[in-house]
């Protein structure tokens, strides 16, 4: 693995762990695709830092479990705004 990828993997993983950010939010911050972030934290991180990988996995699992709530909230806001505009 190239050094710049190894550094990005560590940086991204620490960011997710410290901020509890989603893959999508992290991708936006680092200017890379969601696929890149996902591969970094699910595959590459295991080779770089297995302990950090375990902690990040917990955050990702929490975010995944909460995903339907965030989606429902976004839909609620959308329709509330549409109703207000009419």
Image (cartoon, rainbow, N blue to C red):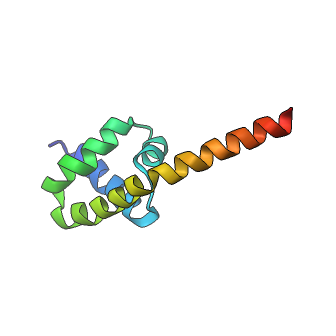
Who's the residue at 42% across and 42% down the image?
Answer: 27
Q: Is residue 27 left or right of residue 10?
A: right
Residue 48 image position (x, y, % from top left): 17, 56
Residue closest to the eye, 10 or 86:
86
Residue 72: give x, y in percent of width and height. 57, 47
Residue nearer the viewer, 38 or 70: 70
Residue lying at 45% horizontally and 51% vertically, measured from the top left:
67
Above/below status of 80 relative to 55? above
73 vs 77, left or right, is: left
State which quarter of the image contains the N terminus. Answer: top left
**Position of 28 relative to 9 (above/below):** above
Residue 51: percent from left, percent from top:
19, 67
Instruction: Look at 39% across and 58% down and name the residue there.
Output: 16
In the displayed structure, 32 sits above or below 48; it is: above
80 to the left or right of 86: left
- Tell which of 16 and 74 is nearer to you: 74
Please tell me in which quadrant of the rendered image residue 74 appears. top right
Q: Quadrant of residue 58?
A: bottom left
Residue under the image location 28 percent in, 59 percent down: 57
């Amino acid at each position: 693995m190239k050094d710049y990828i190894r550094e990005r993997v560590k940086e991204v993983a620490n960011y997710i762990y410290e901020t509890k950010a989603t893959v999508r939010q992290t991708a936006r911050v680092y200017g890379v695709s969601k696929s890149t972030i996902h591969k970094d934290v699910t595959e590459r991180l295991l080779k770089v830092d297995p302990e950090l990988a375990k902690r990040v996995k917990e955050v990702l699992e929490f975010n995944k479990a909460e995903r339907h709530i965030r989606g429902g909230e976004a839909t609620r806001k959308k329709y509330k705004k549409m109703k207000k505009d009419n």
